Amino acid sequence: MKLHLKIWRQKNRKAQGQLVNYTLENVNPHMSFLEMLDTLNEQLIVNKEEPVEFDHDCREGICGQCGVVINGNAHGPLENTTTCQLHMREFKDGETVLIEPFRAKGFPVKKDLKVDRSAFDRIISAGGYVSVNTGQAPEANTIPVSHETAEAAFDSAACIGCGACVATCKNGSAALFTSAKITQLAILPQSQEERKERALKMIAQMDAEDFGHCSNTEACEVECPQGISVLNIARMNYEYNRASFLKFKK
Amino acid sequence: MNTLSRKIVMAATGLFLCFFLLIHCLGNMQLFMEPEHARLSFNAYSHFLTGNPLVKMVSYVLYASIIGHAIYALIITSKNKASGGTYKKDNRGRASKWYSRNMGVLGTVVLIFIVLHFQNFWYVYKFGQIGLDANGNKDLYAVVVAAFQELWLVVVYVIAMIALCYHLVHGITSGVRTLGLFHPKFVRWVNIVGVAYSVIICAGFAAMPIFIYITNLNN
Ligand code: HEM
Ligand code: SF4
Ligand code: FES
């Protein structure tokens, strides 16, 4: 199939970017979206042009590195799918495909389709961990965790940190990501010790990174490749209120 | 304040307004009675409300809530505008409801309506020229009937109630979760009750000017 591409090209953080037109012949419908971009880059290299930069790693939908906005949707036309798991059979022969980086104040563009998502790392560093001296591996059954609790924690932990929720949110809010990370730990017994402190610190970091307020539009859940539930956000609000009322001490 | 506590102010003031609207709507149901009966009963009710110290206190909370809600709406919406990205081609709307994305616009329509509504009745009752009914109470009923002889005002009121309805359909479910209700079962119930509340209250309010306009067509 043949595709007309309009891709955002931007030299560096400060440069003014623009959409550039490319035409790609012989696209195999079974290619993934990233393989299509690889094909374009091979063509650009042959023509001595600079290849389009984009993020990727596992290419199997688990690492959360890939992610661009395709025809106006984060990760493209399919809901709950990463860019690397999107295939060209979802597009029509001769179609024009517009590709832009994720955009939000908290995600500055580094180059072309690559954005700086280190704000997420800083939110995790602020409290998304459990501080214990590991020592020897303890006997797994000494702390009982019910099946339901374990499953609920896994549902929240399924977030791969791709940032599509932020890119999809009209407010550029990181509420879905942050709330999934807070919830996954808030419900497990091993992480109760730092529960209040963790919630307050991660929320403070989320705000420091200039993400917007959550308006509960629920768009994030629809576009999230992992279908992380918006009820995580309600849970974060609960954890915040609980921690504020019970005032944690340093 | 942070992004969560600002939303708590929004939710607390908004939900208080929802509570007020319920009382306000129930009280105004007297307008649907047979006219001479309605006049005495509605005027007596209005008189009771202005005299009662408890009602006076609640009314101050009401004014503060409207102002606080509007100020925080402005702060929140402008920060959100600055934080969110824009795209050359934007198809993000497929994933959410239009009214959930336009709470500021709907709220502004409601705010304009509130100012008009205060001017129509509240101001006239407190400071305007107003007659007395058979019981010697200020005849607010006559002011209401006179106001809704104007078709344009009836249309404005109905449009405002449609805007309010959409604002509340999203506002109630959003506000309750902002306060931290996360259990799926209760959230589902709140959604159902919230939509039912919004539609019933707004339809009730919209019916008042329409009813008065139609029943007074021959006068
Ligand atoms: C009778 C009048 C009103 C009622 C009952 C009401 C109710 C509510 C409720 C319950 C919320 C949910 C809060 C949350 O999402 O956490 C809300 C949100 C909102 N209201 Fe109102 N409201 C009223 C008037 C207004 C007015 C006059 C404005 C604007 C000037 C306004 C602007 C907003 C905005 C912008 C939001 C959304 C906040 C966000 O998306 O982050 N509302 N309202
Ligand atoms: S919540 Fe979903 S969309 Fe957001 S970062 Fe995690 S996986 Fe990506
Ligand atoms: S490249 Fe790892 S999720 Fe897409």
Image (cartoon, rainbow, N blue to C red):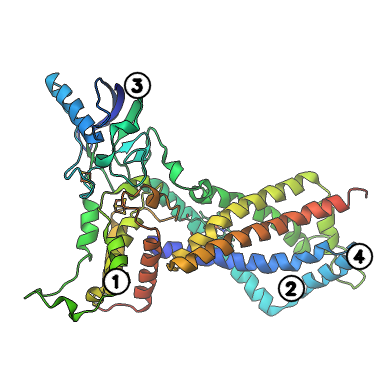
Disc 1 marks which residue? Answer: A147
Image quarter hosting the N terminus of chain B: bottom left
Label 3 chain ID: A
* Tag 3 secondary structure: loop
Which one is in front, A50 or A150? Answer: A150
Residue at left offset 36%, top offset 42% = B85
Asked whether mark 3 and ligand 3 are closer than 8 Å, the reply comes as no
Label 3 or label 2, whichever lies nearer to me, is 3
* C-alpha span from label 2 to label 4: 20 Å
* Tag 2 secondary structure: helix
* Circle 4 residues within 10 Å: few <14, some 14–19, many ≥20: few
Disc 3 marks which residue? Answer: A94
Residue at left offset 20%, top offset 40% = A55
Which one is in front, B175 or B62? Answer: B175
Label 4 or label 1, whichever lies nearer to me, is 1
Mark 3: which amino acid?
Answer: Gly
Residue closest to the far bottom: A142
Mark 1: which amino acid?
Answer: His
Q: Earlier in the sequence, mark 1 or mark 3?
A: 3
Using the image, tell me which numbered label, if any, was put on residue B49: 2
Residue at left offset 38%, top offset 61% = A233
User: Please, is residue A207 above or below residue B137 in the view?
Assistant: above
- Looking at the rendered structure, whether the residues under marks 3 and 2 are on a common chain is answered as no
Label 1 or label 3, whichever lies nearer to me, is 1
Disc 4 marks which residue? Answer: B36
